[in-house]
Image (spheres, coloured by chain):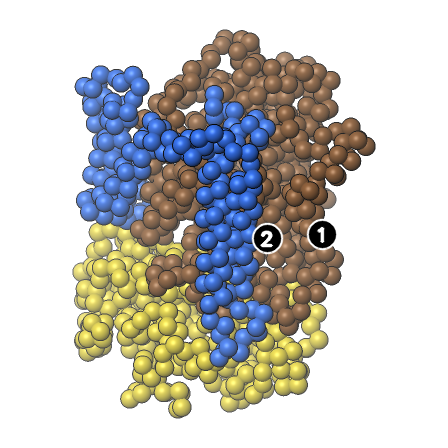
């Protein structure tokens, strides 16, 4: 139900201590990024040799955007800093990075990165895809599942699905849509 | 007007062939399924389908994408009613009354009412699309660089403000980040390459579709897989096909919600999510049985579902006439139109006057299709909800990779998808809305080029930005919008309005 | 540098392969679809031409020829991808020839010139000087006087400094000795639209990009950059610019397919044969040129190179004159004092 609540409750109640601290950090981050972008934009060539109109320099809009981002970041940080301190809010923020949900996310991130940056291009696309689908289903149905299904059944169905997905996607895109897969 | 009717007739006739009907049939069904599956949103569905429509003739491709879009916004209501999870963000308001109705054993009735409301909402939206789009296109011809600059700014500001979940500043930040993404690559005025850091593919800029596939596909997969528990489905056996008197009873709610939804759709970057919330809030304020809202009010369900569906034709109005996306999914539609060589914008009524009416006809036929599916395929759609995410999500990710890759066939676009997936996930976890980000990517080029082009045309003079009639209206609206997001200014005004009119000025979120 | 050696070799063997082109024609049977990278957006003038060409080639080869749009950085992004692709004959590009020849000058791509490509020219597009329908200028003479008098007070809409329109106004201003204020749009189509709406006073984009608006009576075509009047189906012929500026250097922009050098010989001979028969006699291509104010100019090999060189020189030297050349045109063998090829 937590998902529903965050969508529908009034703003004040969703602002946990962790979110306030996260806002503070993010605000400071955007402040710095905004200033950096402003500097980079300021530093862009003004193309004087080409006699362009000085109001049309390439850096104009990036400068405005960098400035606005810094301003918004600053406002966000100030707002977060002024909220009544909630006890242990830093610890709560830290805990959101190591709980079960975070582990599920990190495992998925690792799977996605290994597949996309490592396997695709290194081995044929169908093989990479098959391995990814198989590993994904196995990990989430056994190790990370709350009430895991029997392993033998998971392996069998994961294997079947991996083969089907790899074959269908490769065939449909290479033959049907004439895409040269990586 | 007569011209319009004959063009509309021609539009409908042009769709009465097997290929078109077949494409509408499968695409709207696929849309309903995508919308019903939690974690698959309408925007993501449209972005992924672009790849599949690549080899189709342009009209069939747009038809399939649009049918999928309408289907997905409707499909989300199933999940909202049976699982209390919005199948797409657009059905968040549907959960409020749909789920309580289901728990009272009226799931079938709720699904039936959701179907008819969606259909009627789309019809109200279609009416305004056919009415307003040709007129707006006429006015849009007078839009120059000055006006397009303001429109781009207006889109980002208002989208940032209205879609922000807890704090408008976060909406603005998302919008600015999107605009900054659009700054990467070669700018069109002088051919200078900005923020490329010597990386060759960045010279071409960041494409919208891979970025969208990342921000709405990978980010959504991460969100879905992060959750631990799986909620249970409520099943019921009561009558699905609604009685005429049940529908007729809420006729005023339907019309009002349809109008609100349509206008939320017209505002650039503010789509069906807000359309549904705003209609729901208005219905609740006006209702005689206000206390029932949130506990299983049929009226609330009608308002939410009418509102989100009416936003789709509404969103098509600026999309077609100004090439400004009315919603996140419409942004993908614009990208798809360009891929297929269709140039939406002020010239559309001149270059291709039938096109707007073809869109109207597509929406009409799709509405018929979803009504038929919605009232007949109850069992199948419940089965769809049983597909375990462990088996579904890896397939979706593979499609994200192929979808990002297929359009330009470069690995670079896959890396773009990955980057936006992770960044989008982090921003989403911190309650930053995605719509302004997406809108920023599309509007960045427009904002930048038109500001500087306007300055070049006026020889560095800012006056035309403020005194040209359409420009003046636009900047005043923007200034008011920003002012209203500053509590010190908006609070006294809200208090004043509340006293004078007896209404709260901020709608649903105030509870 | 390896391009140069390969290019030199290719040029050396070109005359030989041409002679036996037909004998090789049947030898290349592509076993998978061929990709033609169009480094511009879909629906643009380049994209349109290439999408007319590819089905004709595909039919002749008995294999699909797929257009892939990779827009960005004035076409440099997509062109870089083609140069980096394996030289197996399955990745081509479609573009204005002069673009590929001058990416080194604009600094968009390092170390590449016209001899990195086998050229297959299909059509020539000519720029047209167009003004809004309600413009104060009724013929090119009046416009020329205004340019000389008001200089930067006259705004010219183009698709950017490196576009066909940008090159065209640069050459006209040199020949007519005047100043102007160029306003860049995101493509030839949008530039023409802005002109029709009256936001800029003049456009010099390609006839194809203005054809629809000229036919619709929203743009007046004052002059065509050619020594012949231009016929566009449905409207009066547009007079040649040489009526007012007889010494104006004229260089039509050629569009076609470019295949990177170093691909197997049978690919080239097969394409040579297709160009000689199927493209030269294509009914569809002829119709396309008639409705869009273009000219059918099929050519390949040395002949194509000779045809394209004038516009390459114009483009390179125009960039130099405006101070936009990152690398001097002499680095691709062009002498801008004499407007000719060094040693050519």
Percent x, y for residue B484? Answer: 68, 43
- Decide: few, some or many residues near mark 1? Use Cα within 10 Å; few <14, some 14-19, many ≥20: few
Describe the element under mark 2 as helix, strand or loop. Answer: helix
Local SS, label 1: helix
In x, y percent, where is residue C84?
Answer: 26, 62
Question: In the image, which lettered chain appears blue?
Answer: A
Q: Which corner quadrant of the image does residue B452 belong to?
A: bottom right
Give residue B474's position: percent from left, percent from top. Answer: 69, 52
Question: Are discs 2 and 1 located on one and the same chain?
Answer: yes
**Residue occupied by mark 2:** B152
The residue that label 1 is drawn on is: B476
- The chain coloured yellow carries which letter? C
Q: Is residue B161 above or below residue B465?
A: above
Q: Identify the chain of the residue marked 2, using the numbered disc in the image.
A: B
Q: Determine whether label 2 and label 1 are within 8 Å by CB.
A: no
Residue B138: x %, y % from top left:
68, 53
Q: Which chain is brown?
A: B
Q: Please indicate, yes or no, whether residue A16 appears anywhere in the rendered image.
A: yes
State the quadrant of the C terminus of chain B: top right
Q: Nearer the viewer, residue B378 or A175?
A: B378
Q: How many discs mark residues in the rendered view?
A: 2
Q: Chain of mark 1?
A: B
Q: Is residue C95 left or right of residue C247?
A: left
């Amino acid at each position: 139900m937590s998902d529903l609540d965050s969508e529908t409750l009034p703003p004040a109640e969703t602002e946990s201590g962790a979110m306030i601290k996260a806002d503070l950090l993010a605000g400071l981050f955007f402040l710095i990024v905004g200033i950096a972008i402003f500097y980079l934009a300021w530093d862009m060539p003004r193309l004087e040799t080409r006699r362009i109109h000085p109001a049309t320099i390439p850096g104009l809009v990036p400068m405005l955007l960098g400035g606005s981002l810094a301003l918004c970041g600053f406002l966000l940080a100030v707002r977060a800093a002024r909220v009544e301190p909630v006890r242990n809010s830093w610890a709560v923020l830290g805990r959101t990075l190591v709980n079960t949900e975070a582990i599920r996310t990190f495992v998925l991130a690792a799977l996605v990165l290994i597949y996309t940056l490592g396997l695709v291009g290194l081995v044929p696309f169908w093989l990479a895809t098959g391995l990814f689908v198989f590993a994904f289903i196995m990990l989430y149905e056994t190790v990370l599942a709350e009430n895991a299904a029997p392993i033998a059944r998971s392996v069998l169905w994961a294997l079947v699905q991996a083969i089907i997905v790899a074959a269908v996607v490769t065939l449909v895109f290479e033959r049907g849509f004439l895409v040269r897969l990586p | 007007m007569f011209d319009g009717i004959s063009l509309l007739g021609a539009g409908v006739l042009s769709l009465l062939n097997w290929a078109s009907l077949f494409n509408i049939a499968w695409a709207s069904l696929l849309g309903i399924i995508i919308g019903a599956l939690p974690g698959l949103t309408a925007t993501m569905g449209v972005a992924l389908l672009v790849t599949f429509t690549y080899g189709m003739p342009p009209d069939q491709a747009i038809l399939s994408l649009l049918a999928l879009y309408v289907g997905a916004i409707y499909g989300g209501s199933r999940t909202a009613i049976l699982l209390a999870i919005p199948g797409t963000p657009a059905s968040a308001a549907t959960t409020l009354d749909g789920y309580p109705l289901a728990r009272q054993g009226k799931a079938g009735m709720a699904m039936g009412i959701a179907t008819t409301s969606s259909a009627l909402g789309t019809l109200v939206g279609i009416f305004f699309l056919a009415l307003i789009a040709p007129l707006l296109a006429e006015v849009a011809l007078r839009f120059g660089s000055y006006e397009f600059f303001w429109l781009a700014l207006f889109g980002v500001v208002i989208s940032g403000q209205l879609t922000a979940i807890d704090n408008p500043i976060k909406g603005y930040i998302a919008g600015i980040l999107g605009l900054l993404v659009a700054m990467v690559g070669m700018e069109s005025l002088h051919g200078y390459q900005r923020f490329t850091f010597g990386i060759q593919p960045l010279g071409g800029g960041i494409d919208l579709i891979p970025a969208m596939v990342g921000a709405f596909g990978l980010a959504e997969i991460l969100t879905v897989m992060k959750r631990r528990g799986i909620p249970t489905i409520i099943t019921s056996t009561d009558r699905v096909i609604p009685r005429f008197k049940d529908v007729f009873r809420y006729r005023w709610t339907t019309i009002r919600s349809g109008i609100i939804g349509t206008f939320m759709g017209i505002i650039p970057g503010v789509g069906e999510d807000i359309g549904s919330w705003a209609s729901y809030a208005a219905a609740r304020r006006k209702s005689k049985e206000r206390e029932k809202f949130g506990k299983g009010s049929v009226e609330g369900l009608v308002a939410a579902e009418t509102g989100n569906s009416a936003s789709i034709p509404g969103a098509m109005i600026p999309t077609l006439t100004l090439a400004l996306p009315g919603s996140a999914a419409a942004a993908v539609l614009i990208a798809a139109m360009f891929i297929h060589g269709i140039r939406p914008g002020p010239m559309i009524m001149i270059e291709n006057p039938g096109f707007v009416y073809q869109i109207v006809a597509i929406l009409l036929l799709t509405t018929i299709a979803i009504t038929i599916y919605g009232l007949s395929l109850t069992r199948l759609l419940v089965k769809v909800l049983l597909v375990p995410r462990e088996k579904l999500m890896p397939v979706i990710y593979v499609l994200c990779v192929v979808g990002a890759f297929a359009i330009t066939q470069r690995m670079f676009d896959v890396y773009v998808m990955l980057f936006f997936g992770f960044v989008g996930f982090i921003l989403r976890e911190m309650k930053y809305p995605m719509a302004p980000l997406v809108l920023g990517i599309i509007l960045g080029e427009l904002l930048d080029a038109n500001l500087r082009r306007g300055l070049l045309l006026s020889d560095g003079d800012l006056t035309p930005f403020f005194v040209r009639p359409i420009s003046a209206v636009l900047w005043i609206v923007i200034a008011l919008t920003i002012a209203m997001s500053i509590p010190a200014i908006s609070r006294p005004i809200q208090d004043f309005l509340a006293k004078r009119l007896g209404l709260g000025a901020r709608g649903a979120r105030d509870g | 540098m390896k391009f140069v050696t390969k290019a030199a070799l290719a040029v050396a063997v070109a005359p030989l392969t041409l002679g036996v082109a037909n004998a090789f024609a049947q030898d290349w049977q592509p076993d998978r679809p061929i990709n033609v990278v169009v480094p511009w957006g879909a629906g643009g003038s380049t994209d349109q031409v290439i999408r007319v060409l590819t089905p004709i080639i595909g039919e002749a080869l008995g294999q699909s020829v797929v257009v892939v749009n990779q827009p960005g950085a004035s076409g440099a992004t997509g062109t870089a991808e083609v140069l980096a692709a394996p030289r197996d004959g399955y990745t081509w590009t479609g573009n204005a020839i002069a673009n590929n020849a001058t990416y080194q000058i604009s600094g968009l791509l390092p170390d590449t010139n016209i001899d990195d490509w086998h050229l297959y020219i299909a059509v020539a597009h000519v720029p047209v000087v167009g003004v809004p329908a309600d413009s104060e200028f009724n013929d090119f003479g009046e416009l020329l006087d205004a340019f000389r008098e008001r200089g930067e007070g006259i705004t010219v809409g183009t698709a950017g400094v490196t576009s066909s329109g940008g090159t065209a106004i640069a050459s006209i201003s040199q020949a007519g000795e005047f100043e102007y204020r160029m306003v860049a749009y995101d493509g030839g189509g949008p530039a023409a639209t802005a002109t029709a709406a009256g936001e800029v006073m003049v456009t010099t984009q390609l006839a194809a990009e203005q054809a629809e608006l000229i036919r619709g009576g929203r743009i007046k075509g004052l002059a065509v950059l050619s020594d012949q009047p231009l016929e566009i189906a449905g409207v009066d012929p547009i007079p040649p610019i040489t009526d007012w500026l007889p010494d104006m250097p004229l260089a039509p922009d050629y569009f076609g397919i470019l295949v990177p050098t170093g691909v197997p010989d049978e690919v080239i001979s097969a394409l040579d044969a297709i160009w000689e028969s199927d493209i030269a006699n294509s009914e569809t291509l002829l119709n396309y040129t008639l409705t869009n104010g273009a000219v059918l100019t099929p050519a390949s090999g040395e002949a194509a190179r000779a045809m394209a060189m004038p516009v390459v020189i114009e483009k390179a030297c125009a960039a130099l004159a405006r101070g936009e050349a990152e690398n001097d045109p002499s680095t691709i063998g062009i002498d801008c004092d004499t407007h000719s090829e060094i040693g050519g």
